[in-house]
Amino acid sequence: MVMYEMVRDRYEWLARNIMKQEKYMKNWPPIEISLKRNRDDYSWYILDRSELNSKKIYLPKSEEAEARKLAFITLQKARLNDMKQELLACERFLKVYCKQSSDYPEYVVSKEASLMLNEGFVNLLSKNTDNPTVDWQKWQFEDYPNGKDYYPSQLNVRVTNNLYVRSKSERSIALTFLEAKKPFRYEWRLEMGNIWVLPDFAAPNKQGEIIFLEHLGMVDKPGYIDDLARKLKNYMQFGIYLGVNLFFTSETGTHPFDIAEARELIRKRYL
């Protein structure tokens, strides 16, 4: 029963995020980057999939900016393909489980997930240019699952009357968001089955995409990197990837927090 519910939750999460990813990538060109090992380096090729037989076009090293852009496109397309494959695997599992279990005589998904799996509906929705924009100010102050019950005694650094954080560095980051009048959420708890993450900050970028920011305050402490690796693995379950929609600030005993670097990161990623 627990396994069924975990897979069902994952199935519905995949359905929602596949639709979001396809909408995000709707106008992308049908090209990717292909790399070929060349002694101690790699040669770059543009892989054009617009025709039946894919064509490879050499990309010189002088076009590094284009190569970086194509690498990002290629990664996003691979990620979308992986999600689709996982969705099919979840669907097969759920159908088999329902046939073998009297607890779930039918395979049940939410109405939202059913709509998102309907190709005709998704195509129609993707053409809608009149979607209402999110009221981010309202979003910021809505009730949301948070970290108030997670070591509450550590929430002892005041930012405003209604916001306390866990360190002076986090306070500086929060104040940077406030000074820029950028709506944000602090320690927005995301859950899926028995997996959860507690990102320090979440805020929309110019395109309305949620970007997450974590402050790493103890990077040089024993075991911290192992904990970070586990955290990154959990983030990936939510479609949150380092360098794509997750970014870090950090400090150590010998490298104090640099507010100027943090402000530049926020300016670049959010403003």
Image: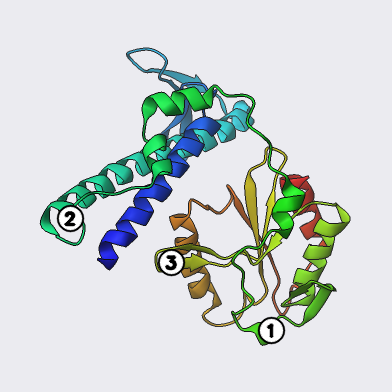
Measured from the top left, where is residue 102 in percent x and y?
Answer: 14, 60
Q: Name the residue under label 3.
A: 195
Inspect the image, locate mark 3, and give the three-letter code of the amino acid beneath it: Ile
Find residue 12 and name its label.
Answer: none
Mark 2 or 3, nearer chain start: 2
Q: Name the residue under label 2.
A: 97
Q: Is residue 261 left or right of residue 95?
A: right
Question: Which quadrant would residue 193 be assigned to in this image?
Answer: bottom left
Measured from the top left, where is residue 145 in percent x and y?
Answer: 59, 66
**Distance CA(mark 1)–CA(mark 2):** 44 Å
Q: Which colour scheme is used?
A: rainbow
**Distance CA(mark 3)–CA(mark 1):** 22 Å
Q: What element carries label 2?
A: helix
Residue with the most extreme left position: 100
Inspect the image, locate mark 2, and give the three-letter code of the amino acid beneath it: Tyr
Work out whether residue 14 or residue 211 is closer to the camera in this orientation and state it.
14
Q: Name the residue under label 1.
A: 154
